[in-house]
Image: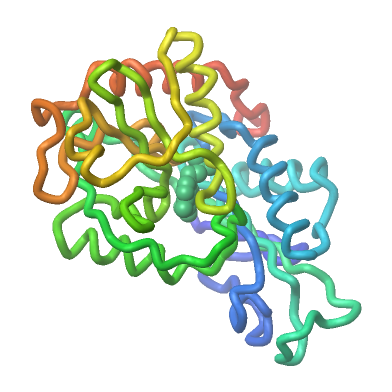
Amino acid sequence: MPRIAYVNGAYIAHRHASVHIEDRGYQFADGAYEVVHTYRGRLIDELRHLERLERSLNELSIARPMAPQAMRLVMREVVRRNRMTTGLLYIQVTRGVAPRDHRFPQRVKPALVMTARSIPEFPPEMRDDGVKVLTIPDIRWARCDIKSVALLPNILGKQAAAMANAYEAWMVDGEEITEGSSSNAWIVTANNTLVTQPTGHQILAGITRRAIFSLAEELGFTIEERAFTVSESYQAKEAFMSNSSHFVTPVTQIDDTVIGNGKPGTLTLELHHRYVRFMDDFEPLASLNG
Ligand code: PDD
């Protein structure tokens, strides 16, 4: 079945979908995005993703392309036309198309693109074995709270991780781990406290991170929002990463250091399973049945 993309008001065959060469996203990375996980026909936490998109656009003074309610309709239509049950819905808004000039153009319409890509369900071996992460310097800008499409440091980090046979790169500012190249970073201390970097300009306030806060509270886990250093992470009892597509993924090695006994930790696995139940609680999209 051919994939369908939404591009500025039209549903187009994915292989023909394109934007203008003077789209400011293309020339200046002048835009923001969201990745919404679709799990067994459910859009996970879509309202929070839309809220965060709105916030990113506000911070960049980019007009919203349409009201959130209309956006939700398009999201459903993209999922439906792609018959996507489990996959990733990508939403990108840029300032629009205008002759190249660093200043904001007058009277430009924001450009909205959505794509859908089916992915296999979360691989059980990743949960059972955990992944390795590589620490790298955090060379990003001072507004990492904005989910901007400018991701050069992130892709360089992810590639460096891949070259080192690691799955994710954890970025380090001074001595402190800020977050992953496309995920939030967590450790569990010897006294079973979950530690993660506080929200602020240094990290993206992950939607999964936020869900984990509620789930951890339900499970009676203690969370401390504070910076943690690379050496503290080496000594952690457990470690994990979180994002929309990887939920709670155990980290069993950081650089050359094996974490704990080298197996995914108990709290991490409990959170992973609890997160899967949390996703199951979302209503499946009616549009997929029709
Ligand atoms: N990335 N930090 C960064 C730098 C991210 O890019 C992401 C998500 C997260 C986690 O956010 P959330 O829990 O809302 O997915 C944290 C997406 C998945 C991506 O760029 O593909």
In the rendered structure, the answer to whether residue 80 lies left or right of residue 123 reads right
In the rendered structure, the answer to whether residue 193 lies left or right of residue 104 reads left
Q: Residue at x 71, y 63 (%)?
A: 112
Q: Residue at x 24, y 50 (%)?
A: 167
- In this orientation, which residue lies closer to the viewer: 232 or 199? 232
Location of residue 19 by image quarter? bottom right
Q: Position of residue 270 (x, y in %)?
A: 33, 15
- In this orientation, which residue lies closer to the viewer: 86 or 150? 150
Q: Position of residue 239 (x, y in %)?
A: 27, 33
In the rendered structure, the answer to whether residue 218 lies left or right of residue 254 reads right
- In this orientation, which residue lies closer to the viewer: 122 or 3? 122
Q: Residue at x 50, y 58 (%)?
A: 2
In the rendered structure, the answer to whether residue 149 lies left or right of residue 157 reads right
Location of residue 214 by image quarter? top right
Way the structure is coloured? rainbow
Circle count: 0
The vertical placement of 190 against 208, above or below, is: above
Location of residue 249 by image quarter? top left
Q: Residue at x 11, y 43 (%)?
A: 257
Whether residue 84 is visible here, answered yes or no, is no
- In this orientation, which residue lies closer to the viewer: 8 or 279? 279
| Residue at the extreme front of the image, as rendered | 174
Q: Position of residue 32 (x, y in %)?
A: 64, 61
Whether residue 104 is visible here, answered yes or no, is yes
The vertical placement of 92 against 234, above or below, is: below
Q: Position of residue 34 (x, y in %)?
A: 59, 51
**Dividing the image into 4 quarters, which one contains the C terminus?**
top right
